[in-house]
Amino acid sequence: MARLLEPVSNGMLHTPETPDDLAEALSRAARHLRTICLEGNGSKRLMAGPVACADETVTTAALHRVLEYEPRDLTVSVEAGLPWREFTALLRQNRQMVPLDPPFAEQATVGGVVASNSSGPRRRLYGTARDMVIGMCFVTLARRIVQSGGMVVKNVAGLDMAKLMIGSFGTLAAIAVVNFKVQPMPEVERTMLLSFADSKTAFEARARLLASVLQPAAIDLFNPPAGVHGSPAWILAVRAAGNQTAVDRYQRDLASLGDAQALEGAPHEEFWRQVEDFTPHFLAAHPDGAVVRVSATLTDLEKCMAPLTVPAMARAGSGVCYMYFDETGSAARYLADVAGLGLKAVIEFAPEARKSELELWPAPGADFETMRRLKALFDPSNVLNRGRLYHRL
């Protein structure tokens, strides 16, 4: 049975140690129509919708076993509560990786990263969780333990059920186990930082890079207010990976695009760790701060990023941009402006106390009705993680 701990501010706390314990904790609460707050380590409470006050809190933090790891097969199966840093350290021992680069990685669990569909700079080359998850075990409020997918990279049978859980913020069911395909770490990695005086030249360099034969692992663009690497310029950060010959070619070719600085070894790793931690550090320094995420075309990315006077960081090869506002009201006004332009945008992070007064997701899209029907199917009494999906579900 799950351990029942002392009462906490958000209801009674349960820490199940097996998927069966998790199923029992969820189903028992649901049968009695008790509302449930479901989380891992709670590292993303500032993300998406509010963490509503609930009768019971269920955490997957005690589900932290490595169930199966076959380095030669490039697959791994772990429980949802395994800390993300512990997970990546395990893979690194065999020079392997699941390159999601999520924010809050120091505190995050595997399940939390997947449930929030968190990703980072290397999404351009490797994709998101939907590209790396090959199977999953999740638990429903009806006490069903559902196996979806498997441990074979090409096995897609039933995987759509698992994909429903990715990005659902625990509003449908509880992720108990995740199976990943893993990637071999590249032989050599090097970062080139290109500096530009204005947005026009920075985006021109970005366009030339995208039109070239080069396929970097990451192309991130930072505006001057971001102050990345202590620079007041526009910075285009290019992460090159491959063998020595390929990476040397990256450095030669990129030198023609602008003033470039190369980072390798520890400086390279530290730079991308700072990028990964940019959001957590900003929010820690700005208690009323908020982060807006905009998904745009490559052309529209320049239009929405160039005029900004606040820090901004873009996945410049995919069109996703994060804008950092030190005051939540400014973020809300900006969100309304970009939504009026037809761009897809959400307030990704905001103070918990302010979320109830904000329109976090002004334009959900045509598929939202399908999401609403899924919620009614999985959680007809609306007891699980109410409002966590940007206050919409």
Image (cartoon, grey):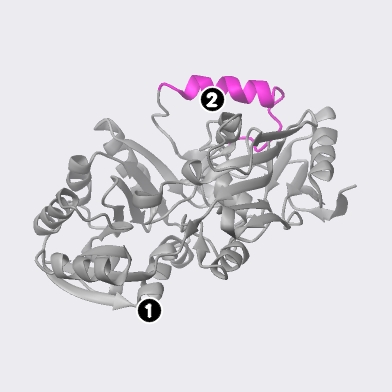
**Tag 2's secondary structure?**
helix
Q: Residue furthest front?
A: 72
Location of residue 303 (image quadrant): top left
- In the rendered structure, the answer to whether residue 10 lies left or right of residue 164 reads right
Circle 2 is placed at which residue position? 371
- In the rendered structure, the answer to whether residue 333 lies left or right of residue 368 reads left
Upstream in sequence: badge 1 or badge 2: 1
Location of residue 215 (image quadrant): bottom left
Magenta part of the chain: 366-387
Circle 1 is placed at which residue position? 265
Figure check: 235 above or below 36: below
Which residue is at a point 35% across and 56% down the rendered structure image? Answer: 324
Query: Is any atom of residue 70 visible in this view?
Result: yes
**Tag 1's secondary structure?**
loop
1 or 2: mark nearer the eye:
1
Q: Residue furthest bottom?
A: 266
The x, y position of residue 178, in whole percent, is 64, 46
Which residue is at a point 60% across and 63% down the rendered structure image? Answer: 107
Question: Considering depth in this image, is 99 or 335 the residue closer to the camera?
Answer: 99
The x, y position of residue 379, in whole percent, is 69, 26
Near mark 2 (Cα within 10 A), the count class, few <14, some 14-19 or many ≥20, is some
Indicate yes or no whether the magenta region holds residue 369: yes
The x, y position of residue 213, in whole percent, is 18, 52
- In the rendered structure, the answer to whether residue 352 lies left or right of residue 304 reads right
Figure check: 188 above or below 200: below
The type of residue carrying mark 1 is Gly
The x, y position of residue 247, in whole percent, is 26, 68
Which residue is at a point 9% across and 55% down the rendered structure image? Answer: 200
- Check the picture and name the quadrant holding the C terminus: top right
Which residue is at a point 15% across and 48% down the rendered structure image? Answer: 211
